[in-house]
Image (tube, rainbow, N blue to C red):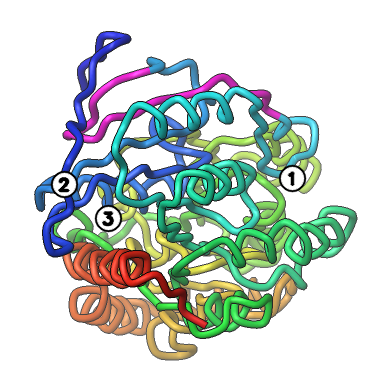
Amino acid sequence: MRPLAPDSMSAADAQTVGGRTINILMVTDYYRPHVGGVERVVHELSRRLVARGHAVTLVTLNTDCAPLRESVEGIEVIRVPCLQLTGMLRAQLTLSLAVWPKLLQLATSRRFDLVHVHGLILPLALPGAFVARAFGLPLVMTAHTGSTEAIGGAVGGLVPAYEQTAGRLLLGLSQRVIAVSRAVAAHVAALGAGRRVTVVPNGVDSRSFRPGVPRAGEPARILFAGRMIFNKGPDVLLEAMPRVLQRFPGTRVDFIGGGPLRAVLNRRASELGIAPQIRFLGDRDDMPELLRSGDLLVRPSLLEGLPLVVLEAMASGLPVVATAVGGTPEIVADGVTGYLVRPRDTAALSARICELLGNAELRQAMGRRGRLLAEREYDWDAVCLRTEKVYAQALAERNSGREAS
């Protein structure tokens, strides 16, 4: 990655010729070096768009003191100052007023063909949408999460209220809506997206994420990968582990990812008397190797769209125990590639984990089936091509002066 001079442009203005070459303004709250599923989805899509000849200017929040401008695999990345509230709320939220003048300045000085924003409930999507409308550009919005009904609590009440107000406004401004799963598509359709929704699932690089060599004679290793925030459910897995360790006392659990709950979880592990079996590895950039070293992945989320790490675990030949929320049941077939449980059901979660830990043949069979599904159905190059088709639809509708109903 190389920094850009403050007044340089790595993404030259591109002319749209028959929908083949597009100059895209990509807007996402989170991007590298911030670690998470949306960040990886945006990066994998953007770098493939660049490889196919399109120009991508990506505007994001500067959550990790990264360079304000740099080129990442041909993507022009522009980061804006922000205020992080994640630690205070223990839920992921970052705000920025600086994004408004930056988006306006870019749209004034560049000839973009369309704007692509990410996240129905992420704050940067609305500024991106308003700039698209102000400059007469078609807007494509990708919804990454489905129903929030399993969250509960104060945040669980605020998110639906936001969706019913700002979310509906965002959908109304969008020319086309991409949903990462059928469950997400149904959710945004119920909020007013109508027939403008296209399902384009997340992908996985099955060359990087591949099965490892089976381990023999070593303690079982359970993996959790995701932000340490309540909606990802790391606390649910921790509460389930005493039952698991009663039956399989040598088992280790590796929590991969950073976030505001890490210290809380560390204390809770000590209170439960299981701290020696728990490791908190923080954010890592060697996920393929970490997944190859595990025996199963546990994803006890309260909110999901189509969890990228589940696809990566399946491509790595791991069975998955996950909650039946969002699009997870579309990739984890209960009893076939893993097990599904209800949100916050620690008894069911521990029972399914124990079932897999006690049966190596079952783990391997589920892992093989998951690998085949990931290879056959979820490919990043196909995701890029399907996204291009959505762009072509949005541009054609803009050029013909009509909007989809």
**Residue under circle 3?**
292
Disc 1, disc 3: CB below 8 Å? no
Mark 2–mark 1 distance (CA, rounded to whole Å): 62 Å
Task: Name the residue located 59 percent from the left edge and 23 percent from the top edge.
Answer: 98
Of mark 1 and mark 3, the one earlier in the sequence is 1
Is residue 20 left or right of 289 when viewed as pictured?
A: left
Judged from this view, the residue extending furthest toward the bottom is: 335
Circle 3: element type: helix
Q: Nearer the viewer, residue 402 or 119?
A: 402
**Residue under circle 2?**
15
**Residue under circle 1?**
273
Circle 1: element type: loop
Q: Position of residue 149 (x, y in %)?
A: 77, 72
Q: Quadrant of residue 346?
A: bottom right
Mark 2–mark 3 distance (CA, rounded to whole Å): 44 Å
Which residues are drawn in magenta? Answer: 69-84
* Residue 64 visible in the picture: yes
Of mark 2 and mark 3, the one earlier in the sequence is 2
Q: Amino acid at mark 1?
A: Gly
**Mark nearer the viewer, 2 or 3:** 2
- Relative to residue 8, is residue 102 depicted above or below? below
- Relative to residue 27, is residue 137 depicted above or below? below
Q: Nearer the viewer, residue 130 or 285?
A: 130
